[in-house]
Image (cartoon, grey):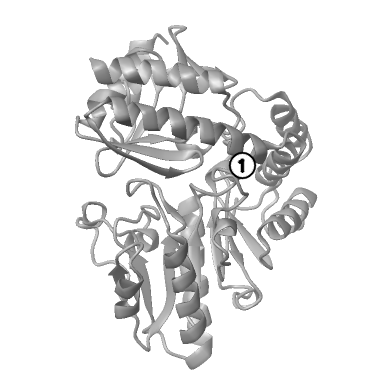
């Protein structure tokens, strides 16, 4: 089919939950994508922080092809070697105790909520426990994940949601303390708020929430679906804050394109869920876990974290210079390779101007231009991005 035909078929056949850019992507190589007309795009979105290793990585592709030729799916009624290996490795990387593999980040949040609820139920036999979430947060669009997402525009048509959810202000410890009651069983937050506008947590806030949870016997759930897997220069962002969660969620770059997520439990929560409490048909299948293993292999072999540290410092300086040079940029904020520029211009117009010039970039809430490129970008890629962005902002 030709480009316009593909778009017409998609618009006629897909439920319209996305306003898509008017291009049809066909293939990728390195940090570049190509549409069906052959136009080349520098990718600073990475499939929404997913394709950490860039496109057409031969080692990654070969690993998946080898697993496809062996075994793709078995169900969780049986063991499989890729899942066992991936579980051991992700537990070691996080310092957690056990893992449950899901198909997505949203499903990881659902599992985390259930784990927290069951943990509280086992303590006192009650089911009226409360969870504190953050305003301007984003955890997903299923009913449980939506219930702890602190943005009314996502929620208003879908009530009633899960009861017992309270919202506090991110980076405001007193706001969190004020929301705590004797029914509070968990506090859920993103270590770096992504969709909500690119707000890193402060060390004082995260350490304060961790201390509060310890004092009140409350579980801390950290959502690192977007900011985890190396994006902040450590495998998980919480490593930089001197805290550890009781429950952790991850996804996106965990499989670098293959749909896989996970929630992890620490010693306190590892034995809470028992057979019959939770399940998934596809989660943790051999193909998804082969992807996880190969991603970890490449991270270690190619020292991806070192590249993130080096290139992010350069990118921050470039973005700061753009913020200084353009009055339409209010602020840069972020942590390593999850960055945002808050604009006074309509962010959608800037996205489209960049796309016309061959740069894929996406937005976040609050009129923010979001930068979540593959973790393998170079200084030359940053310079190319900056040149295009400057031209778009100037126009």
**Residue 28 in the image: x percent, y percent?**
55, 19
Q: Secondary structure at mark 1?
A: loop
Query: Who's the residue at 37% across and 38% down the image?
Result: 340
Q: Is residue 97 visible?
A: yes
Q: Can the viewer see residue 23 in this picture?
A: no
Q: Quadrant of residue 303?
A: top right
Q: Residue at x 77, y 57 (%)?
A: 79
Please name whichever residue, 135 or 26, is drawn nearer the observer in this view of the structure.
135
Instruction: Name the one closer to the observer, 312 or 245.
Output: 312
Q: Which residue is mark 1?
A: 255
Tell me the residue at 53%/80% (across/down).
Answer: 119
Residue with the most extreme bottom position? 124
Q: Compared with residue 125, is residue 280 higher up or lower down, i.e. above or below?
A: above
- Residue 266 position, x and y percent, is 63, 71
| Nearer the observer, 168 or 129 | 168
Q: Is 297 displayed left or right of 245 in the figure? A: right
């Amino acid at each position: 089919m030709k480009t316009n035909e593909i778009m017409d078929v998609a618009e006629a056949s897909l439920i319209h939950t996305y306003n898509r850019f008017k291009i049809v992507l066909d293939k990728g190589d390195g940090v570049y994508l190509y549409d069906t007309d052959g136009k080349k795009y520098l990718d600073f979105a990475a499939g929404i922080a997913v394709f950490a290793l860039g496109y057409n990585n031969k080692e990654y592709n070969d690993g998946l092809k080898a697993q496809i030729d062996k075994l793709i799916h078995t169900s969780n009624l049986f063991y499989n070697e890729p899942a066992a290996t991936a579980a051991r490795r992700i537990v070691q990387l996080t310092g957690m105790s056990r893992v449950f593999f899901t198909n997505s980040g949203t499903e990881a949040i659902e599992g985390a909520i259930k784990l927290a609820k069951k943990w509280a139920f086992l303590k006192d036999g009650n089911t009226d426990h409360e969870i504190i979430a953050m305003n301007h947060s984003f955890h997903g669009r299923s009913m449980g994940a939506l219930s702890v997402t602190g943005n009314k525009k996502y929620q208003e048509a879908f009530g009633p949601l899960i009861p017992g959810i309270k919202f506090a202000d991110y980076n405001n410890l007193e706001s969190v303390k004020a929301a705590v009651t004797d029914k509070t069983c968990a506090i859920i937050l993103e270590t770096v708020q992504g969709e909500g506008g690119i707000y890193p947590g402060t060390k004082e806030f995260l350490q304060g929430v961790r201390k509060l949870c310890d004092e009140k016997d409350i579980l801390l759930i950290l959502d690192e679906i977007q900011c985890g897997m190396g994006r902040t220069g450590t495998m998980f962002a919480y490593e930089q804050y001197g805290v550890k969660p009781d429950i952790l969620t991850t996804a996106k770059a965990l499989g670098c394109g293959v749909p896989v997520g996970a929630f992890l439990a620490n010693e306190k929560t590892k034995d809470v869920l028992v057979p019959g409490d939770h399940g998934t048909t596809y989660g943790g299948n051999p193909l998804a876990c082969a992807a996880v293993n190969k991603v970890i292999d490449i991270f270690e072999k190619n020292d991806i974290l070192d590249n993130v540290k080096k290139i992010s410092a350069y990118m921050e300086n470039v973005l700061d210079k753009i913020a200084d040079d353009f009055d339409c940029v209010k602020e840069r904020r972020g942590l390593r390779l999850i960055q945002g520029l808050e604009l006074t211009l309509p962010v959608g117009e800037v996205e489209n101007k960049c796309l016309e010039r061959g740069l894929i970039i996406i937005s976040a809430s609050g009129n923010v231009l979001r930068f979540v490129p593959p973790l393998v970008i170079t200084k030359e890629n940053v310079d190319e991005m900056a040149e295009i962005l400057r031209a778009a902002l100037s126009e």
